[in-house]
């Protein structure tokens, strides 16, 4: 998708509400300017310059992880040109957020945060940051879009803004016109590293949650169900789309609860079922061991289940490719091929990635009719992972009495599921 991101500040704005004594924009800026600091991260060979948001009078400052990571020494500089040494409390690369602590701060004025869920496209916003090391600078714009996925991390849910932002603004706030933080500027789309009017900001609700986790634990403890989801359209459904389970991790809480690939989610606790990324973000913010009542649609009938949220496994915490769901690799080393008459296709298996690829397909088969193509890969059958070609044969034999299988596959349009009729070869 986007390949030209310079990690800098970005966007966001909240609904403007008039007050009895309405402040001018100039007065609002003057009121909040002292809550923004410049951040200097020194690793011995070079310095990274960014911005930060004062979040408490006792010296906590939040900034971007890409500003703070790998630093041997850090400092923050206030608008009064006072310089303080800062230590790293915790860092979360999945959301690009870091929390710093200054000892014995003097006259630190914390910023006030707004509810970023109330932000609307078109809201006026302004950013304060440290572009090119010049010190606190202000730029004005609007919210251009919401819920942007720029493939920067597994929980992308950025606000987009046309507010001018440049190198050195990373970690600075995006304010609404009431002077409340609605986002932390994180990235821009740029061909040369400078402002082109397309910036991205982490919503304030995410910033607050992550910084509280870092403050309490030094890391972010995320909830995990272990399912991959995709929007699907349902016939005769008043809703535009539903979320379908298209993949499931091994030993996942979802699997233990009885969820299966192909299930349509109708209710998961009080979580909103709008889109897969937003759902994964909500799950990640759910405390481990929380019981979630689940209602799914399976084979045309509703079924009630209950899943206990687990903590995101360490291997997924460390992998940048791993989502709260499953991730997929694109390279394959085919070990051998065989023909599966029941499926109407010839397949090969990659043992390293435990994935099957379609090498040939009968154009008259049910698989071809339902949109599968040569080159598509599938990892799961009837909700279970495939571990070898022999394992695939066993699963096909077990499915023969039913006359069909549900395949979870990856094609040109992404992840999907399909139910295939099996040929009777007995």
Image (spheres, rainbow, N blue to C red):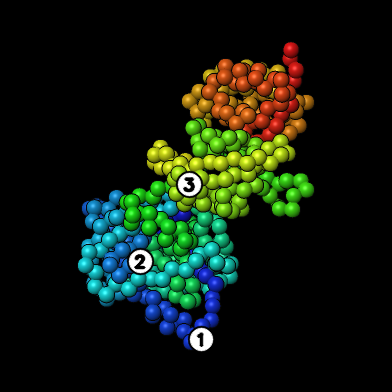
Secondary structure of the residue carrying numbered label 2: loop
Locate residue 190 relative to residue 345 in the image: left or right.
left
Instruction: Give the residue at x 35% y 66%.
Output: 55
Q: Answer yes or no: do the residues labelled 1 and 3 have beta carbons within 8 Å?
A: no
Image quarter hosting the C terminus: top right
Marks 1 and 2 sit apart, C-alpha to C-alpha, by 27 Å
* Vertical comparison of 92 with 415: above or below: below
Q: Secondary structure at mark 1?
A: loop
Foreground: 211 or 294?
294
**Residue 167 in the image: x percent, y percent?**
39, 62
Q: Which dot, 3 or 2, sits closer to the camera?
A: 3
Question: Could you say which is closer to the camera, residue 168 or residue 36?
Answer: 36
Residue to which mark 1 is pinned: 20
Question: Which comes before the other along the chain, label 1 or label 3?
Answer: 1
- Residue 61 placed where, x, y %? 32, 63
- On the image, numbered disc 2 is attached to which residue? 55
Residue at x 51%, y 69% (from the top left corner): 13
| Circle 3 Cα neighbour tier, 10 Å, few/some/many (<14 / 14–19 / ≥20) | few
Q: Quadrant of residue 422?
A: top right
Circles 3, 2 touching at the beta carbon (< 8 Å): no
């Amino acid at each position: 998708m986007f390949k030209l991101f310079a990690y800098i500040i970005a966007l966001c704005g909240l609904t403007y509400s008039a007050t009895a004594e309405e402040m001018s924009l100039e007065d609002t800026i003057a009121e909040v300017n002292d809550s923004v600091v410049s951040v200097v991260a020194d690793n011995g060979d070079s310095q990274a310059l960014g911005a930060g948001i004062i979040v408490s009078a006792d010296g906590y400052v939040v900034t971007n992880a890409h500003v703070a990571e790998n630093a041997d020494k850090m400092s923050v500089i206030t608008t009064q040109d006072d310089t303080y040494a800062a230590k790293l409390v915790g860092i979360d690369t999945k959301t690009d957020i870091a929390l710093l602590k200054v000892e014995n701060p003097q006259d630190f004025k914390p910023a006030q945060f707004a509810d970023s869920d109330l932000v609307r496209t078109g809201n006026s916003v302004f950013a304060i940051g440290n572009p090119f090391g010049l010190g606190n600078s202000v730029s004005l714009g609007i919210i251009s879009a919401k819920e942007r996925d720029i493939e920067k991390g597994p929980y992308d849910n950025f606000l987009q803004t046309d507010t001018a932002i440049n190198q050195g603004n990373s970690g600075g706030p995006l304010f609404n016109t009431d002077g409340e933080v609605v986002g932390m500027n994180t990235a821009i789309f740029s061909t040369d590293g400078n402002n082109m009017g397309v910036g991205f900001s982490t919503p304030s609700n995410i910033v607050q949650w992550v910084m509280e986790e870092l403050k309490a634990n030094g890391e972010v403890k995320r909830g995990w169900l272990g399912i991959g989801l995709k929007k699907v359209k349902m016939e005769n459904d008043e809703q535009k789309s539903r979320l379908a389970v298209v993949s499931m991790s091994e030993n996942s809480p979802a699997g233990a609860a009885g969820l299966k690939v192909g299930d349509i989610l109708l209710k998961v606790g009080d979580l909103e079922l709008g889109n897969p990324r937003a759902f994964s973000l909500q799950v990640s913010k759910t405390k481990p061991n929380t019981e979630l009542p689940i209602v799914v649609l399976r084979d045309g009938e509703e079924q009630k289940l209950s899943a206990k949220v687990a903590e995101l496994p360490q291997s997924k915490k460390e992998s940048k490719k791993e989502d709260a769901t499953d991730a997929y690799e694109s390279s394959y080393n085919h070990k051998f091929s065989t023909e599966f008459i029941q499926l109407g296709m010839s397949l090969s298996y990659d043992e390293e990635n435990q994935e099957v690829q379609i090498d040939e397909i009968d154009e008259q088969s049910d698989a071809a009719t339902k949109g599968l193509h040569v080159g598509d890969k599938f990892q799961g059958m009837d909700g279970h992972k495939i571990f070898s070609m022999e394992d695939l044969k066993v699963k096909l034999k077990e499915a023969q009495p039913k006359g069909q299988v549900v395949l979870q596959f990856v094609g040109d349009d992404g992840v999907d599921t399909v139910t295939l009729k099996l040929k009777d070869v007995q």
